[in-house]
Structures are given as C-alpha cells and as structure tokens.
Image: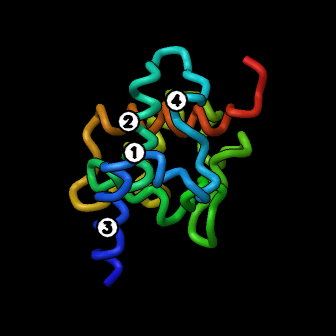
Amino acid sequence: MRSHLLAAVAVLSFACPALADAGSGRPPADSLPVPLGATREEVILGDRIFHGELADGQCFVCHGMDAKGTANGNDLTNGLFLWGDGSLKAIRTTILHNMAIAPRMDGGLTAADADAVAAYVWAISHQNQNR
C-alpha cells in the first residue's frame, strides 16, 4: 500500500510539480539560494530526489516533506547540523559516508545525486538568511 502511495505521489508530482509543493510546507526549489560550487539546476534536482520523485530518493521519510524533521530524522531547515559544519562539502560527506545517519535506499545515490541533494539541503538550511 505504501509503495503504491509513493508511486502515485511521484507520478503526480512529475506531471505537475506545483502539486508536490501545495500544502507541504515545501518552498519552491527555484526560489531557494544556491550555494557556491553548485547550480540552481542541482538545487532543483536535489529537491526532486529528496522528495522521492527521482533516483528512488527517500530523504523525506525521515526528514519530512517540509524537511523539518520527524521522530527518525533531524530538522534540515534550521541551519543546525549534527554532523559537520553545514557546508556543502560536509552535507555531501554525510549523505555519502554516514549511511547509518542518512541511509541510502535501494542501492544508493550516485555521486551526482548526492551533489544535488547536498545543494538542496544547503539551500533549505539557508533559505531565511540574507545572502
């Protein structure tokens, strides 16, 4: 049942990305800041991977659709990081190497996927800061 629900959400959000954001507390990825060393396209791709729309990403399962955390994962929007200094490099390292903390699902993410998710996580953690 859960897999059917995730598939339906992925199909609907792919067909109409605005539906994925509606009511989720999820900011539009194209309005987020872009970290040095990344591109706006990576932030947008990372958003889609984070929310399970691509690359079988399941970050939202623990961190929530709004990335504010759940009982199983910390808030990624407040700029406070448990692992590393919150830099793009540190976030990427956590995604790739600390899988007990940020599990990769079904074979893991590619390096490009990890770069994109790191750019997105950096962006949502800096969305309320003046840059």
What is the CA distance from the residue labelled 4 to the residue labelled 3? Answer: 23 Å
Q: Is residue 35 above or below residue 116?
A: above
What is the CA distance from the residue labelled 2 to the residue labelled 3? Answer: 19 Å
Report if residue 60 is visible in the image: yes
Three-letter amino acid code at the position of disc 3:
Ala
* Disc on the earlier residue, 1 or 4: 4
Which residue, given by chain and number where applicable, does mark 1 sit on?
A: 48
Which residue, given by chain and number where applicable, does mark 2 sit on?
A: 45
Which residue, given by chain and number where applicable, does mark 4 sit on?
A: 30
Q: Residues within 10 Å of mark 2 (few under 14, many from 20)?
A: many
Disc 1 and disc 4 in contact, CB within 8 angstroms = no
Disc 1 and disc 2 in contact, CB within 8 angstroms = yes
Which residue, given by chain and number where applicable, does mark 3 sit on?
A: 8
Q: Is residue 67 above or below residue 124?
A: below
Which is in the foreground here, disc 1 or disc 3?
3
The answer to which of 46 and 105 lies nearer the viewer is: 46
Which is in the foreground here, disc 4 or disc 2?
4
Is residue 81 rendered to the left or right of residue 17? Answer: right
Tell me which corner region of the image, top left, top right, bottom left or bottom right, holds residue 65: bottom right
Q: Secondary structure at mark 4?
A: helix
Three-letter amino acid code at the position of disc 1:
Arg
Q: Secondary structure at mark 1?
A: helix
